[in-house]
Image (tube, rainbow, N blue to C red):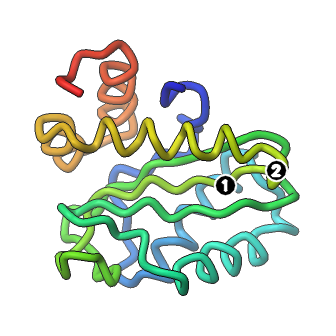
Amino acid sequence: MKFSDFVSVKSLRAELVSDAKENVIAELVDSLQSAGEINAADRDDIIKAILKREELGSTGIGRGIAVPHTKHPSVEKLIGTVGVSSTGVDFDSLDGEKVQLFFLLVSPPDRPGDHLRALENISRQLRDETFCRFLKQSKSAQDIITLLEEADSNQYGS
């Protein structure tokens, strides 16, 4: 699975304004709503579902990266977005560091394979230090798109 299979380019946020965990999640869900990927009526419920998943254990996986995710019946296909925070956000990360890179995923409950493949792809790409460094320096949605396309065409060492 590639980023182009699930990342909504219209929802990318190179300059997140939120500085708290719940607000970042809401900002990213709002970006999916603005891009027409989720319905306004489902916004609050999707945010609650992601926060409930966070209660099981932080999706802040370390090295300035978080992958908040949930399954929700309102979506018909796996959808994701990427957000970058230049200052970093306290996300209860496993290593205690602030998070700068966010990959948010929402998938249908009946498609667990897609959900796992997306998480695996994200995890594999984020092991590449160069990819992460460039992504953290993104100043525009186009910067993020370019990096995701390069990752999809295996231009990084993962």
Q: Nearer the viewer, residue 86 or 105?
A: 105
Mark 1 and 2 residues: CB-CB less than 8 Å, in contact?
A: yes
Residue 81 at x, y percent in the picture: 52, 48
Q: Residue at x 37, y 29 (%)?
A: 148
User: Which mark sits nearer the N-terminus, 1 or 2?
Assistant: 2
Residue 54 at x, y percent in the picture: 52, 79
Residue 127 at x, y percent in the picture: 22, 42
**How far apart are the two marked residues, 1 and 2, measured between alpha carbons?**
7 Å
Q: Nearer the viewer, residue 158 or 51?
A: 158
Callout 2 crowding tier (Cα within 10 Å): few <14, some 14–19, many ≥20: some
Q: Is residue 113 left or right of 155 when viewed as pictured?
A: right
Q: Is residue 142 left or right of 155 when viewed as pictured?
A: right
Mark drawn on residue 117: none
Seen in the picture, residue 45 relative to 3 is either above or below; the reply is below
Check disc 1 and give the amino acid type.
Answer: Val
* Quadrant in which the N terminus appears: top right
Residue under pointer 2: 75
Q: Residue at x 31, y 36 (%)?
A: 125
SS class, disc 1 = strand
Q: Residue at x 34, y 79 (%)?
A: 91
* Quadrant in which the C terminus appears: top left
Looking at the rendered structure, the number of numbered marks drawn on it comes to 2
Seen in the picture, residue 50 relative to 128 is either above or below; the reply is below
SS class, disc 2 = loop
Q: Residue 116 falls in which quadrant of the image? A: top right
Residue under pointer 1: 106
Q: Nearer the viewer, residue 126 or 88?
A: 126
Residue 2 at x, y percent in the picture: 50, 25
Check disc 2 and give the amino acid type.
Answer: Val
